[in-house]
Image (cartoon, grey):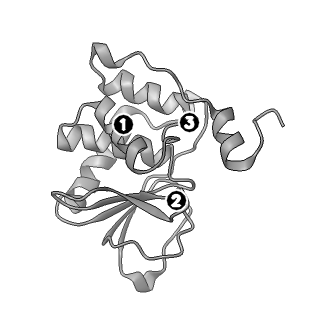
Amino acid sequence: MDKDYDQIIVNPVPIYMGAFPITVQPPASVVINLCGDRTFDPSWGQIVLAMPMRDSPRPEDLPDREQLEHFLAAVHIFTRREASYWHCLAGLNRSGLALAAYLHLFWGMPISKAISLLREKRSPWVLCNPLFEGTLRTWYGTDDEQEFTPISFDDYLRERYGRSSGS
């Protein structure tokens, strides 16, 4: 995750995923903002669609399924023909949740494949909050996609910052 963003998919339209703040304008005309309190330089001329979400281990902090799907249906109006940039603060959990659900709902991708794709293209730490991955698998996974081994958040902190959640 040394870059501002990563290209996830090229066809039928490019999808990028990353963090905020971003120092280089992404090649996308639509920005999907999952932090809600961040804006882009208006001179970039992008359409910004926002759904504020917290990156929290508490289920009550997640949007409910209907809210997420309603937002993604609105997003699809813009992203089905235009390149999009999906971001949250770190470009891992909130954007991972929304983009994996989008790929499943609107591109017909199995949820396990969507999660794997994001980890391959963006970072192995995508959905390091186990609540987010578990929620996706519960909502959209088939019977054989329910079980998973959560990514160790402490391992992520050690690799990224040289410390664990207890330090």
Give percent across and percent down for residue 53: 52, 46
Q: What residue appears at the point 50 percent right and 21 percent down from the top-left corner? A: 149
Mark 1: which amino acid? Ser
**Of circles 2 and 3, which is in front?**
2
Q: Which mark is residue 155?
A: none
Residue 69 can be seen, yes or no: no
Front residue (pair 54, 8):
8
- The residue that disc 2 covers is 19
Residue 154 can be seen, yes or no: yes
Secondary structure category for the residue under label 2: loop
- The residue that disc 3 covers is 61
Secondary structure category for the residue under label 3: helix
Give the spatial CA distance, label 2 vs label 3.
20 Å
Give the spatial CA distance, label 3 vs label 1.
24 Å
Could you classify mark 3 by the number of other residues whose Cα lies within 10 Å: few (under 14), some (14-19), or many (20 or more)? few
Placement of the C terminus among the 4 image quadrants: top right
Give the spatial CA distance, label 1 vs label 2.
19 Å
- First along the sequence among labels 3 and 1: 3
Height in image: 48 above or below 130?
A: below
**Of circles 3 and 1, which is in front?**
1
Give percent across and percent down for residue 9: 27, 54
- The residue that disc 1 covers is 116
Could you classify mark 2 by the number of other residues whose Cα lies within 10 Å: few (under 14), some (14-19), or many (20 or more)? many
- First along the sequence among labels 1 and 2: 2
Give percent across and percent down for residue 95: 44, 49
Mark 3: which amino acid? Asp
* Left or right: 35 as drawn, with respect to 147: right
Q: What residue appears at the point 61 percent right and 29 percent down from the top-left corner? A: 152
Q: Quick check: marks 3 and 1 in contact, CB under 8 Å?
A: no
